[in-house]
Image (cartoon, grey):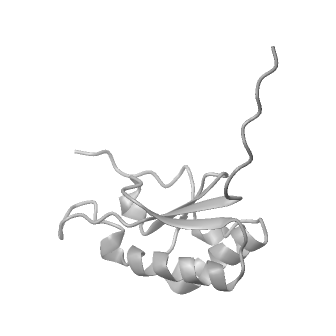
Amino acid sequence: MTAEADPPPFFRAHVFVCCNRRPDGHRRGSCAARGSERLRDYMKARAKELGLEGVRVNMAGCLDRCEFGPTVVVYPEGVWYRAETTEDIDEILSAHLRESGRARRLMLTERDVAPPKA
């Protein structure tokens, strides 16, 4: 029996920017309270300006790494970033999505683990 191949990916890269908003004063904070919506809008516009073909930037609900936000994850690689400024976004777009490398200084790794939920 021959397995049927998956269809080709619709996007070469799918970028999710957490835009979850928690109430002010929440102990875990939220990416939206740290400016992620503005950064997502910038990233979408900048990716288009740079002509990054096959890249889709979307907002996401909670990605559950609130303490490190604003958080961004790039698929299909599943690489996580913390982006606080438009310069950080430019670095991610350039290093990861244009040059197929990594924006190492912004990466979240297995060492970046949120404290246990109470």
Residue 90 in view: no
User: Which residue is rendered at x = 55% and y = 78% of the image?
Assistant: 43
Among all residues in the image, which is located at the extreme top?
1
Along the line of sight, which residue is nearer the eye, 43 or 53?
Answer: 53
Find residue 35 and report its image quarter.
Answer: bottom left
Q: Position of residue 98 (x, y in %)?
A: 75, 73
Percent x, y for residue 97? 71, 69
50 relative position to 44: left or right: right
Tell whether 3 sits left or right of 90. right
Viewed as shown, does residue 114 lie left or right of 23?
right
Identify the residue shown where x is 67% and y is 54%.
10
Q: Quadrant of the C terminus?
A: top left
Q: Is residue 47 left or right of residue 39?
A: right
- In the picture shown, does residue 61 fall above or below 37? above
Q: In the rendered image of this protein, does residue 26 appear above or below residue 50?
A: above
Image location (x, y in percent) of residue 11: 67, 58
Q: Kindly tell me whether residue 114 is visible in this rendering.
A: yes
